[in-house]
Amino acid sequence: MSFDTLGLAPEIIRAVKAKNYETPTPIQAKAIPAILDGKDLIGCAQTGTGKTAGFTLPILHRLMAGKSPSLRVLVLVPTRELAAQVSDSIKTYGRFLRLRTAVVYGGVGYAPQIQALRNGVDILVATPGRLLDHMRQGLVRYNALEVLVIDEADRMLDMGFLPDVRTILKTLPTQRQTLFFSATMPPEVQRLANEILKQPTVIEIARQGTTAKNVRQVVYSIDTARKRDLLVHLIDKEQMGQVLVFTRTKHRADHLAGQLERTGKRVAAIHGNKSQAARTKALEAFRRGSIQVLVATNLAARGLDVKGISHVVNYELPEVPEDYVHRIGRTARAEAAGDAISLVAPHEREQLREIERLIGEKIPQSTVEGFEHRPDTGTDAPKRSFQPRREGRHAGRNSGAAHRQGPSRRFSERGAPRFAQGNERSLRSPRADSAPHQGPGPARNGQEGHGHKPADRQPVAGGSWRRWSSN
């Protein structure tokens, strides 16, 4: 099968061939005819399968058939990077068409986006939070909307955007074509699909939890304290090309990037606390090859489309097993081969078992001489980032009879929290943690507008909680 046989307009075929694409991927071969027929669609496929072109090409063909001064297509995506990628794809394949496209997301100024919306657009690509900001200012109207695309729906759920998506859906015309894409289908995402789709065509390219076929996976068991040294050794020994390294937290991403830079590596970090300008600059440098190593949180697990990533390294395993599939899908794209390396400390072994259960296979394990795990190091649990103070007025509050004497007793009776020995506790004020973002303008921690995800909470020893945001 070739693109010529799919019934697309000559102008679109010309743009596809200008990119040197001749044969559609499986999801493109199935999705394009269904979308051209005007059917609602559920596309369940892993990253790197070509689904963006799978909906972009038939939408562009449809828009050629009619004219309207108003918005005709809305594409909702969870992240700024994915919004930019989809927008670029539309511009690439629509280069010979006279169509107007705009992209809106948080973390950047409002003025250019407002001007683009006032000038009128045929296709709007948006993240939910920033789109709601523009809707509340009366800048977006849906009276002529023909097609709605919801891309990476499961990521919308992960980031807490589904309430915003539901708010937007209430304003859209019921007579429309809806295209729904998701790598996985957790129950809440399935319910949303059932609510908004009408007799959809279902296309599932790979079962949920299936990794890309050309990715070579390997696990190295290593103590946490030696991960950095092993990573440097592997980069040099394997003569790696473009390396994408994943950490679980923003702090770890910055810290690791600094360590790698001190070893002479060309490196940058991206995460939710970086400005959009800084993130864009780092991605462009990575695409050009002027930096070799990009350290990222899960923010980059989806929507990051960089050709030629030779290695993905899980410096820390993700909390959610499905995120492993999305992370390693950044390599071996477009039928190329790639390597996925996981550096697994003893305390991460249960997470590794969950990943292996999800993907249905045992990941091969390897060792590097001189970097073997040393059993005498104990549990190798992560170092605690906070220890309660024990000097001064409230000294001894954590143990024994001293806790019940003098000023410390009066302090405890007033309801102040007691710290079990070794517990961690967030020092941020409740107001800073829980106050909702008030638009317009970007939210804290890199979230887009009103749809920011509440901080995750994880229990630690003794029943207290610590907070973090990993995007």
Image: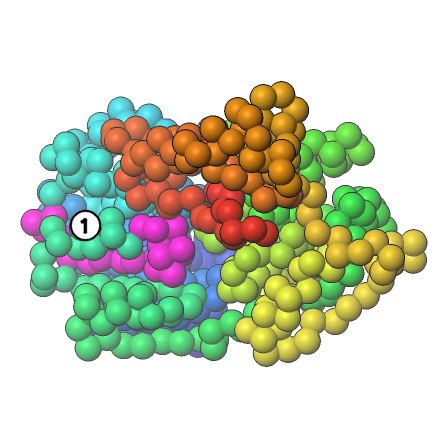
Q: Residue at x 31, y 66 (%)?
A: 188
In this view of the protein, can residue 303 be seen by the observer? yes
Q: Residue at x 38, y 39 (%)?
A: 447
Disc 1 packing (10 Å; few <14; some 14–19; many ≥20):
some
- Quarter-wise, where is residue 119 in the image? top left
Residue that carries the numbered disc 1 in the rendered image? 168
Q: Is residue 90 left or right of residue 465?
A: left
Viewport quadrant of the N terminus: bottom left
Q: How is the image coloured?
A: rainbow
User: What's the residue type where badge 1 is placed?
Assistant: Ile
Nearer to us in this view, 162 or 237 = 162
Count the marks. Answer: 1
Q: Which residues are magenta?
A: 142-161
Nearer to us in this view, 224 or 312 = 224
- Quarter-wise, where is residue 24 in the image? bottom left
State the image coordinates of residue 438 (x, y, percent, origin top left).
Answer: 26, 31
State the image coordinates of residue 322 (x, y, percent, origin top left).
Answer: 51, 64
State the image coordinates of residue 87 (x, y, percent, origin top left).
Answer: 36, 45
State the image coordinates of residue 270 (x, y, percent, origin top left).
Answer: 55, 38
- Quarter-wise, where is residue 69 in the image? top left
Provide the secondary structure element on which disc 1 rests. helix
From this view, report whether residue 59 is shown above or below residue 395: below
Q: Residue at x 46, y 49 (%)?
A: 457
Nearer to us in this view, 93 or 458 = 458
Q: Please check the rendered image and state whether residue 223 is part of the magenta-colored stretch, yes or no.
A: no
Q: Please check the rendered image and state whether residue 159 is part of the magenta-colored stretch, yes or no.
A: yes
Q: Is residue 376 left or right of residue 13?
A: right
Outermost residue to the right: 370
Q: Residue at x 81, y 66 (%)?
A: 366
In this view of the protein, can residue 66 be seen by the observer? no
Nearer to us in this view, 433 or 245 = 433
